[in-house]
Image (cartoon, helix red, strand yellow):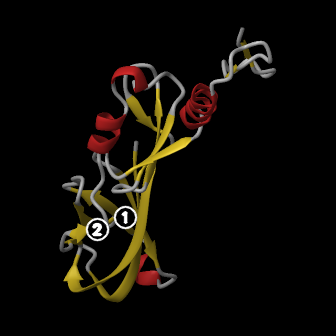
Amino acid sequence: MATTDDYGQGVSIAALTDAPDASALARNIANAIVSRSVMRFASASARTAALSGASAPVEGMVTWLQDVDRLYRYNGSTWDPVAPQAQSGTFNVSFSGLDTYTGSAVTFPTAFSATPRVVLNINSVAGGTARWTARATSVTTSQFVPFFQSSASGATAVWSTVQIDWIALAP
């Protein structure tokens, strides 16, 4: 009669009194280990195809999807990302005689699966940028448009290759 492991994980272990069945023993051990390991799949569709029927996902399973380089955990009904997606970068801004400026669209290195939150930082110690704010507008899963505004209306400025740092986070 088979017993289970000492750790209460439901791993079936053959008893010495059971008839020898190397195939069943190997399958029980492999199934127990694989279902509790991080499983790797090329994509979500490959994961769905593999985890069906007797191999359907159970709550707590963890998978790595290679196409999006992301870890997911099964909550019993859906696959949830384990951690937010994050990307960052820099770009330079130059303009002259303006009190607001809308830059060109910045494309993320990799498209997000959901619309991210984007934070911009004006990376300068120059006095000409001290009274300016920066924010991302028109944010999509693949890009955003930077917008800059002087806190002193009508106070124009000249920016020459001012570095802007950005970070984007998506659930």
Give the quarter of the figure containing the C terminus.
Answer: top left
- Secondary structure at badge 1 equals strand
Give the quarter of the figure containing the N terminus.
Answer: top right
Residue at the location (28% across, 75% down)?
155
* Horizontal arrangement in the rendering, residue 150 relative to residue 41 (left or right): left
Residue that carries the numbered disc 1 in the rendered image: 133
| Residue 153 seen from this side | no
- Secondary structure at badge 2 equals strand
Residue that carries the numbered disc 2 in the rendered image: 148
Inspect the image, locate mark 1, and give the three-letter code of the amino acid beneath it.
Thr
Vertical relation: 71 (above or below) 36: below
Vertical relation: 147 (above or below) 39: below
Q: Between 24 and 164, which is closer to the camera in this rendering?
A: 24
Q: Between 80 and 101, which is closer to the camera in this rendering?
A: 80
Inspect the image, locate mark 2, and give the three-letter code of the amino acid beneath it.
Phe
Vertical relation: 119 (above or below) 50: below
Q: Quadrant of residue 37?
A: top right
